[in-house]
Amino acid sequence: MSRVGKAPISIPDGVTVTAESAADAAGSPVGAVVTVSGPQGELTRELAAGITVHVYDGVAALDRADDSRSQRSLHGLSRALVANMVEGVSAGFSKELQIVGVGYRAAARGPSALELSLGFSHTVPVTAPEGISFEVPSQTSIIVKGIDKQLVGQVAANIRKLRKPEPYKGKGIRYVNERVLRKAGKAAK
C-alpha cells in the first residue's frame, strides 16, 4: 500500500464529498469523478482509472485496483489531490508575493485585476482567472487567493515570472521567505 494513499481524509463539518464511477464514450471505465463542495465553493476532478473513492462517517478513503507500479504512484497522488480539494473548499489557499526594487509597486484594480510597475516603460496588467482573487495590503506585497491549490500556485508563478529576482541587487518579484542567491558584482580596483 502507498503510505500516502492509504491515509484516510477527514471531512470537516460543512463539506460534502461525492464520488461517481465514470465511463468514456466507448464504455470502458475511467477513474472516479470526485466532487467536493463546502463553504468556499465547489471543485470537481476526475481521478486516474482504477482508483475508487469510498465516503463514510465523515471520512474519505481511496483504494486502487491492483498493485502495479503505476497504480501505486497514482494512489498517493489521487489521495493528495482529494485532500487538497477538501482543504480548499473549507479554508482556501493563498500565496504571498513580495516586490523588491526602487519604483516597483503593485496596485489593485478590483478583486481580480492588478497593475504592476516593474521598471518597464509601461505598466503590466494582470487579470485573474475565474476562482482567483488578489489582495494588495501594501504597494510591495500581493496575496493570491483561491480554492484550487494548483491554480493559486500557477497564477503566483506567472506573476513572479514577469520580473524574476535578479542575483546582483535582488530586485524583482519573489515569494515571501524565498531565499534569493546573491552574486558579488565586479570587484573595484
Image: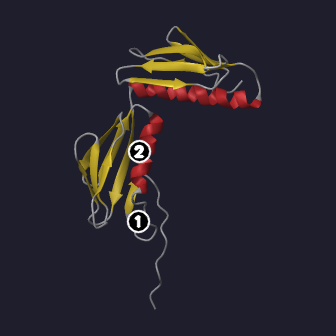
Label 1 crowd (10 A; few <14 / some 14-19 / many >=20): some
Amino acid carrying label 2: it is Val
Q: Is residue 153 left or right of residue 69?
A: left
Foreground pick, 30 / 78: 30
Residue at 48%, 19% in the rendered image: 35
Up-down relation of residue 48 to residue 181 (above or below): above
Residue at 41%, 44% in the rendered image: 155
Foreground pick, 132 / 91: 132
Q: Where is residue 133 in the image (x, y as percent from the top left)?
A: 31, 38
Residue at numbered disc 2: 155
Residue furthest to the bottom: 189
Residue 8 visible, this angle: no
* In this view, the mark in front (2 or 1): 2
Amino acid carrying label 1: it is Gly
Q: How far apart are marks 2 and 1 (CA)?
A: 22 Å
Residue at 22%, 42% in the rendered image: 110
Q: Quadrant of residue 29?
A: top right
Residue at numbered disc 1: 170
Q: Where is residue 159 in the image (x, y as percent from the top left)?
A: 39, 51
